[in-house]
């Protein structure tokens, strides 16, 4: 939001709600091939890493047909399963626009695909991150409700000036969340499943802390957008995640006004510890820039 309180105007060619046509016919053969490369290596890696709900969603939407998915082909099935649709946007959209889409069960997905020299990492969400990473989980009815609740909560958090806390919840769940299953820890976060290197790091590397999810704890923990996470939070079930959000956040936000941030690598006495990480990766300065 700008200083005068108005949302930035959509860029030329975009609608009032920042959506654009996907323009599927205009993707080049090289762009379709980039999707295929990314798809093939993630699909090969993810059994044993991603949670069953994610893998089922990937199948349900038939995302493996080859090339960049056409939203007109995904949407009827997604809509039938959970009432969600995917809409195309130019890239990051203002927070309030983002929340309004989520609150109405529309997921805004970047229209563009990354270039070949950025296969492993980019900060702006492209169509591979948004569609491969986020959309499969939206086929799960419980997760679908959680995302809508997040959109509605975002609108309230903005009014209460606590957006930073809610954004941390999004980061540590929707983007970088882990799920405890009878088969072991599994990934459900879109930022992890859409990254080959972070999928391996998040589950297998001894560096990061892996701690039980707690709503307030998560909201007190800063995050990094430039490298692998130093802490991942583990939910016991998607239902438990949804249940945690079905309460009035106003008293929590009020308490957070005076609560301090938890250092990103800290383990608290009350944390449920899955992994007490060595933090060796972060201490070594990270290596994302030279990954692969
Ligand atoms: N826009 N397209 C897009 N995708 C996002 O994930 C996104 C966004 N705008 C704001 C935003 N995320 C976050 O800052 C909010 O969750 C707070
Ligand atoms: Fe994302």
Image (tube, helix red, strand yellow):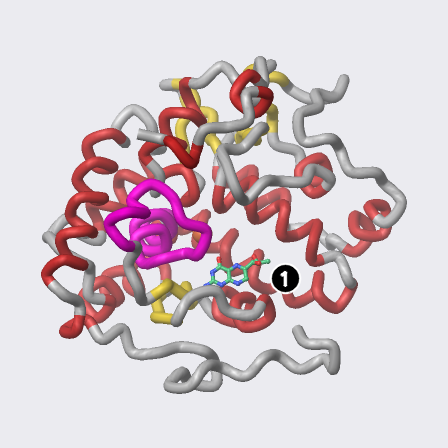
Question: Which quarter of the picture shows residue 88?
Answer: bottom left
Position in image of residue 242 (x %, y %): 55, 46
Position in image of residue 11 (x %, y %): 45, 81
Q: Quadrant of the N terminus?
A: bottom right
Position in image of residue 185 (x %, y %): 43, 23
Q: 167 and 286: which one is in front?
A: 286
Q: Residues within 10 Å of mark 1 (few under 14, many from 20)?
A: many
Q: Is mark 1 within 8 Å of ligand 1?
A: yes
Q: 175 and 227: which one is in front?
A: 227
| Residue furthest right as drawn | 258
Examine the rendered structure and indicate whether residue 59 appears above or below residue 206.
Answer: below
Task: Say if residue 210 shows up in the picture.
Answer: no
**Residue 125 counted in the magenta span:** yes
Q: Secondary structure at mark 1?
A: helix
**For the point 59% across and 21% down, which residue is it?**
283
Q: 153 and 91: which one is in front?
A: 91
**Residue 193 counted in the magenta span:** no
Position in image of residue 94 (x %, y %): 56, 70
Residue 71 placement, left or right of 134 = left
Q: Quadrant of the C terminus?
A: top left
Residue 281 placement, left or right of 113 = right
**Range shown magenta:** 115-137
Examine the rendered structure and indicate whether residue 218 appears above or below residue 282.
Answer: below
Q: Which residue is mark 1?
A: 154
**For the point 36% across and 19% down, which residue is it?**
183
Question: Which quarter of the picture shows residue 32?
Answer: bottom left
Task: Say if residue 252 shows up in the picture.
Answer: yes
**For the point 17% across and 44% down, which residue is it?**
37
Examine the rendered structure and indicate whether residue 229 appears above or below residue 162.
Answer: above
**For the point 61% across and 32% down, which residue is it?**
213
């Amino acid at each position: 939001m700008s200083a005068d309180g108005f949302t930035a105007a959509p860029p030329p060619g975009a609608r009032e709600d920042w959506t654009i046509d996907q323009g599927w016919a205009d993707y080049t053969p090289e762009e379709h091939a980039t999707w295929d490369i990314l798809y093939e290596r993630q699909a090969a890696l993810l059994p044993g890493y991603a949670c069953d709900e994610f893998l089922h969603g990937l199948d349900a939407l038939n995302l493996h047909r080859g090339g960049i998915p056409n939203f007109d082909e995904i949407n009827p099935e997604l809509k039938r399963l959970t009432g969600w649709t995917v809409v195309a946007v130019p890239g990051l959209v203002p927070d309030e626009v983002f929340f309004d889409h989520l609150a109405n069960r529309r997921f805004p997905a970047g229209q563009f695909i990354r270039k070949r020299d950025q296969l492993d990492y980019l900060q702006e969400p492209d169509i591979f991150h948004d569609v491969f990473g986020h959309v499969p989980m939206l086929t799960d009815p419980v997760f679908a409700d959680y995302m809508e609740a997040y959109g509605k909560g975002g609108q309230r958090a903005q009014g209460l000036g606590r957006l930073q806390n809610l954004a941390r919840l999004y980061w540590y769940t929707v983007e970088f969340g882990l799920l405890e299953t009878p088969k072991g820890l599994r990934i459900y976060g879109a930022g992890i499943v859409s990254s080959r290197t972070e999928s391996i790091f998040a589950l297998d590397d001894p560096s990061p802390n892996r701690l039980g999810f707690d709503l307030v704890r998560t909201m007190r923990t800063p995050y990094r957008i430039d490298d692998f996470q130093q802490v991942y939070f583990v939910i016991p079930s998607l239902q438990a995640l949804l249940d945690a959000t079905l309460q009035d956040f106003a008293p929590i936000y009020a308490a957070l006004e005076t609560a301090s941030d938890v250092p990103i690598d800290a383990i608290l006495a009350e944390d449920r510890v899955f992994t007490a990480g060595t933090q060796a990766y972060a201490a070594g300065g990270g290596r994302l820039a030279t990954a692969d």
